Amino acid sequence: MNIILRNLSLTFDLESETPFFQVSIPHRIRFDADMISKPLVTTIVNQLFDTPDTTHCSFLSKYLSPIHAREKTRVGRFFNIINWREDVHVGEDTYIISTFYKLTNEALINYLLYVPRSFINPYIIFYNNHHIVYISSDVLDVISCSEEVIKNYKAKYADIMDTDYE
C-alpha cells in the first residue's frame, strides 16, 4: 500500500521497512514508549491532525496464508469504524491491510496512549496528506512532509526524543 505525503512516497506493508526508515532524518522523529505521555500525544495529534475528516488509519488486520490468523489491534474499542477498505497483499505471506477513515482526535489520543501499556503490538499507522504517526509497543514515530514541523518537534522535545537513529 503506497502512501503519498506531498513530496514523500512511503510503502506500508510487511515487505517494507517501517515508515520511519523510509524517509530521511529531517522528515522524522522518534519517541521511546517510556517517554510517551498524555500532554505529548495530545499536542502531536492536535497539531498534526487538525481536520479529523482527513485522518485515516491503516493496519495489518489478518494473515491469510500460510496460516489464517487475525491480528489483535483493539481498534474497535477506540474508534467508530463505519467506512473501511481491505487490501489483500500477496508476497511471502498473504495478509490484509485494512484502512478506515474519519478518526476523532480524542479516540486517536486514547489509542496512542493505550498501545504502549497493552500487551498488543499492532502494525498500524495514522495519517493524512501531510503526516504519519506510527505506534508500536516500543516507539511512537512521527513522519512529516514538512521538515519545519519535525525541526520544531526536535527542538521542543530534544530531551525526550529517541536519538539512536539520528
Image (spheres, rainbow, N blue to C red):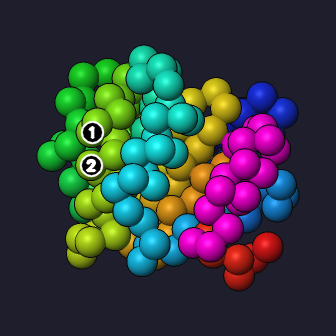
Rendering coords of residue 137 (x, y %):
39, 72
Question: Given the image, on which type of amino acid does mark 1 rest?
Answer: Ala
Does residue 166 show up magenta in the picture?
no
Q: Secondary structure at mark 1?
A: helix
User: Can residue 81 be seen in the rendering of this structure?
Assistant: yes
Rendering coords of residue 32 (x, y %):
51, 74
10 Å crowding of disc 1: few (<14), some (14-19), many (20+): some
Instruction: Give the left or right position of residue 136, taking residue 22 as reference.
Output: left
| Image height of 45 relative to 158, above or below | above
Quarter of image, res 7 = top right
User: Front-most of 95 and 71?
Assistant: 71
- Image quarter where the C terminus lies is bottom right
Magenta highlight range? 144-160
Rendering coords of residue 54 (x, y %):
49, 21
Instruction: Give the left or right position of residue 58, taking residue 161 as reference.
Output: left
Rendering coords of residue 97 (x, y %):
44, 46
| Image height of 109 relative to 141, above or below | above
* Residue furthest to the bottom: 164
| Image height of 95 relative to 99, above or below | below
Q: Which mark is residue 110?
A: 2
Q: Which residue is mark 1?
A: 107
Question: Given the image, on which type of amino acid does mark 2 rest?
Answer: Asn
User: Front-most of 55 and 66?
Assistant: 55
User: Front-most of 71 and 45?
Assistant: 45
Quarter of image, res 157 = bottom right
Q: Secondary structure at mark 2?
A: helix
User: Can residue 124 be seen in the rendering of this structure?
Assistant: no
Does residue 147 show up magenta in the picture?
yes
Residue at point 34% right, 46% down? 109
10 Å crowding of disc 2: few (<14), some (14-19), many (20+): some
